[in-house]
Image (tube, helix red, strand yellow):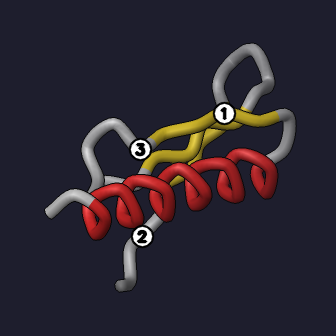
Amino acid sequence: MDFSIECEREVDGRWIAEIPELPGAMANGATREEAMARAEAIALRAIAEQLDHP
């Protein structure tokens, strides 16, 4: 499954990453890469949960 990750920097310096295809799949991090990795991990857990409980 392919999904896109939208990432932007907040005024306080932290990064927020969101996956629009999965409502609620968002994460923050000190760096852009950290935020994106955390959002991807959340998305993969959500997909695995859906496969386990169809």
Q: Quadrant of residue 31?
A: top right
**Disc 3 target residue:** 25
7, above or below 2, in the image: above
Residue highlighted by disc 1: 28
Amino acid tagged 2? Ser
Which quadrant would the N terminus be assigned to in this image?
Answer: bottom left
> Which structural element holds mark 1?
strand
Q: Nearer the viewer, mark 3 or mark 2?
A: 3
Q: Earlier in the sequence, mark 2 or mark 1?
A: 2
Q: How many numbered callouts? A: 3
Q: Residue 20 placed where, x, y %?
A: 30, 54
Q: 23 or 10: which is nearer to us? A: 23
Residue 43, label in figure:
none
Q: Secondary structure at mark 2?
A: loop
For the C terminus, the quadrant is bottom left
The reply, left or right, for residue 1 in relation to residue 27 is left
Residue at image location 56% in from the left, 45% down from the top: 17
Real-space Cα separation, disc 2 to disc 1, in angstroms: 16 Å
Is residue 14 toward the left or the right of residue 52 in the image? right
15, above or below 47, in the image = above
Residue 4 tag number = 2
Q: CA distance from mark 3 to mark 2?
A: 11 Å
Return the residue found at the far front: 52
Disc with the residue nearer the chain's start (3 vs 2): 2
